[in-house]
Image (cartoon, rainbow, N blue to C red):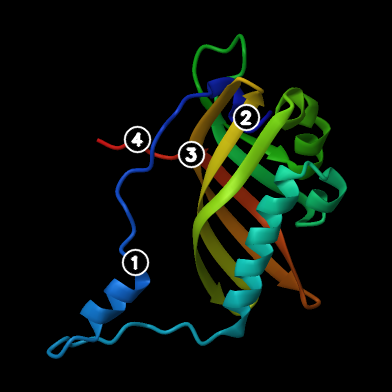
Amino acid sequence: MVRNTERLKQPSVRGTMVPLAMALAVATAPGCAEQPEVATDPMVAVIETRVADYYRDMSARNWGTYREYFWPGATLTTVWQPPGTPAPAVVPTTIEDFIAQTHLGPDSKPIFEERLLRQQVRVRGDVAQVVADYEVRFGEPGSVMTWRGVDAFTWLRHRDEWRISALTYVDAPEEE
């Protein structure tokens, strides 16, 4: 299983996120009943940094370093239609199998980059959920495809170490 490289297309992101400053201005305007929830957990910044580093190391194709972002046996799951199958299906892959197959995906072309566009982080104790929008560049000089996707991470802290226990990814919904 490879990260959607068999389904290459050029989707765009549906909708836009309201800039945080604008959202805060509206939410704190006189007459607003609720105040916005302010992130006071210092772990949010830790996770945001880990996610940014994850995309940097994936794009560098440094698979040994990339592997260390995941707990042993962690899964990467997507909907994919393997060659010769009649329909797309949900396909979970362990991190070990994913890395063993990078020659079929990210390593199959000279140009590969996954760039973090934005992330939403929520931390509760030793669990963090992250939804991240990213953009991919993939191909060869003169023929580079781009598309966007969404990653949904579950990070788990054990012995003061944050690693990914599960990652689900899909192409970003197209604008309607």
Point out which mark residue 19 bears: 1
Q: In whole angstroms, how far apart are the C-alphas of marks 3 and 1?
A: 20 Å
104 versus 50 height, above or below: above
Q: Tell me the CA gap for discs 4 and 1.
A: 21 Å
Q: Secondary structure at mark 4?
A: loop
Measure the C-alpha gap from mark 2 to mark 1: 29 Å
Q: Residue furthest bottom?
A: 30
- In which image quadrant can residue 153 be found? bottom right
Mark on residue 174? 4
Mark 2, Cα crowd under 10 Å, few <14 / some 14-19 / many 20+, is many
Going by the image, does 36 lie left or right of 31?
A: right
**Of the numbered discs in the image, which one, if any, rests on residue 148?**
3
Q: Amino acid at mark 2?
A: Phe
| 25 displayed left or right of 173 | left
Foreground residue, 74 or 107? 107
| Rendered location of residue 111, percent (x, y) | 69, 30
- At a point 28% along the width and 73% down the height, the residue shown is 22
Residue reaching furthest front? 142
Q: Which of disc 1 and disc 3 is earlier in sequence?
A: 1
Q: Amino acid at mark 4?
A: Glu
What is the x, y in percent for residue 12? 39, 37
Instruction: Look at label 3 and name its amino acid.
Output: Arg
Mark in front: 3 vs 1 = 1
- Give the mark nearest the N terminus, 2 or 3: 2
Residue 138 - label: 2
- Farthest residue in the top direction? 84
